[in-house]
Image (tube, rainbow, N blue to C red):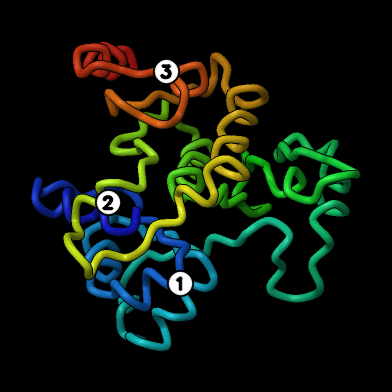
Amino acid sequence: MNGSIVRFAEAGIRPLFYLCDDRGFVRLRQPLVRQGIELAEHAALGAGALEVLLEQAPDALDGRSVYLMQRTNRPLDGEELSDRAYAWSVRKDPDLECRFSLWRQKPNRIGFSRNMVKGYFCGRTIPFAAMQLGYHLGFRNVVLVGVDMGAQPGRFYEQGDAALPSRLDEDYDDYILPSFELVAERVVGPHYRVFGLSPVSRLPERLVPRLSLDQLDELLARS
């Protein structure tokens, strides 16, 4: 996801998917995005990210396997519903989990998609899109690596004043944490589990249980 592709390149690992849905990241870190698309077997890009990339580097997708990640309630054709109306409209859809509130707007933007054909909920952080892609592809265990949700000391692949600003602090309480709470409440079960590999994370362990490296080895051995 985003700039974490640097670590895969250093380790000589070719990931199954590279994800990016941030048009600003594509605009300011295009070499990293191109590296991700070239290294991964497949790429999944948000509509805005794809648009910027094609404007700046139309050859970047030549010969590559690329999928469009479309946000829920963001149709390419036609008009989108209000967040409240959309949340109400999908309340009985088994592929989509969504909060609903008559009184507050923000809860209606919190959700999880089991079927990416119907779109995805951004959760204001790209790992949340990756979790939905994992479910869509049929994976039963998701292990979050490097998802500590701390705005400081910053991204490992950026240093100093040139680093892109982070919105984690602004979005955590209103969007990120409620999104992970919904997953723990309505999605996680015997068929789909989410773990974290970071020993220290802003996400509570009640929502994302921690794994040691030894526990990860055991999990992989059983998978």
Q: Secondary structure at mark 1?
A: helix
Q: Which residue is mark 1?
A: 23
Residue in view at x 85 percent, y 41 percent: 101
Quarter that holds the C terminus = top left
SS of the residue at dot 2? Answer: loop
At label 3, counting other C-alpha atoms closer than 10 Å, the crowd grade (few under 14, some 14-19, many 20 or more) is some
C-alpha span from label 2 to label 1: 19 Å
* Nearest to N terminus: mark 2 or mark 1: 1
Front-most of 46 and 101?
A: 101
Separation of disc 1 and disc 3 at Cα? Answer: 31 Å
Q: Which mark is residue 209?
A: 3
- For disc 2, the marked residue is 154
Residue 19 image point, x, y percent: 39, 56
Taking depth in this image into account, of 213 and 150 the one nearest to the observer is: 150
Mark before the other along the chain sequence, 3 or 2: 2
- Vertical arrangement, residue 179 with respect to residue 8, above or below: above
Image quadrant of residue 114? top right
Image height check: is 138 above or below 70? above
Residue 40: x %, y % from top left: 27, 56
Q: Residues within 10 Å of mark 1 (few under 14, many from 20)?
A: some
Left of 13 or right of it: where is 117? Answer: right
Identified by mark 3, the residue type is Pro
Q: Which residue shows up at 45% across the image and 72% down it?
A: 23
